[in-house]
Amino acid sequence: MKVLRTVHFPPPISSLMRSLSEVGFFDRSLLIGSWVMPLYQELYEARYLLRTLDVDFAVHLAHPQKQMRVDLERLITDLGFIDFMAAEGVQKFTASGYEVEFIAHRPGGREIGTLAVREWNINAMALPFISILTDFSEAAVLDDATIFPKPSLSIS
């Protein structure tokens, strides 16, 4: 596991990452989108400067009968984020100009817009091929928070 020393996120995002790590979210889910690029820059020397204000997480869907592990909605709002419903019922969180959302693998046809993630008490936007991202990840530590799942863990 690589410790990332030169990557620094703004305080609201750093606090969010640490809190998600502490409750085990990154055991099977991960950061995706443009916010992962500073990490890839340190890991692989990949240069990429663009970063959006939305922070995306690919979340693994547990078996529907699984009990809730942690109430992420409450955890995130306790950090000062405000939750709201966007288009098609997608749950998002906002603070300091940043938007946080969760994305899950869409298991079927296009008619699925959002998926309930009961394990974490959130809903996620359903998109195809998200499992490709979760199947090929690296483990890394940022500010004492493990933010990627273990590389040997396949969650497809």
Image: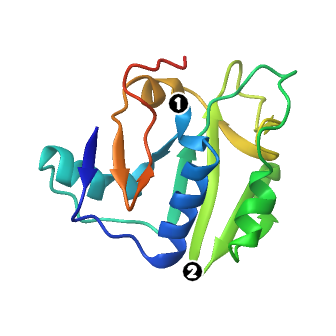
* Quarter where residue 150 is shown: top left
Amino acid identity at mark 2: Gly
Tell me if residue 21 comes above or below residue 98 in the rendering: above
- Tell me if mark 2 has few (under 14), some (14-19) or many (20+) residues whose alpha carbon lies within 10 angstroms of its own: few
Residue 61 lies left or right of residue 139; in this view the side is right
Query: What label sits on residue 79 in the rendered view?
Result: none
Tell me if residue 82 comes above or below residue 110 in the rendering: below
Q: Quadrant of the N terminus?
A: top left
**Residue that appears at 18% across and 53% down:** 42
**SS type, badge 2:** loop
Q: How many marks?
A: 2
Residue 83 spot, x, y in % from top left: 78, 67
* Quarter where residue 95 is shown: bottom right
**Residue that appears at 45% across and 46% down:** 32
Residue found at the very far left of the displayed protein: 45
In depth, the one of 139 and 106 nearer the eye is 139
- Tell me if mark 1 has few (under 14), some (14-19) or many (20+) residues whose alpha carbon lies within 10 angstroms of its own: some
Amino acid identity at mark 1: Ile
Q: Which residue is mark 2?
A: 97
Residue 2 spot, x, y in % from top left: 25, 43
Q: Give the Cα separation between the discs numbered 1 and 2.
A: 26 Å
Q: Which residue is mark 1?
A: 130
Tell me if residue 59 comes above or below residue 128 in the rendering: below
Residue 55 lies left or right of residue 77; in this view the side is left
Q: Quadrant of the C terminus?
A: top right
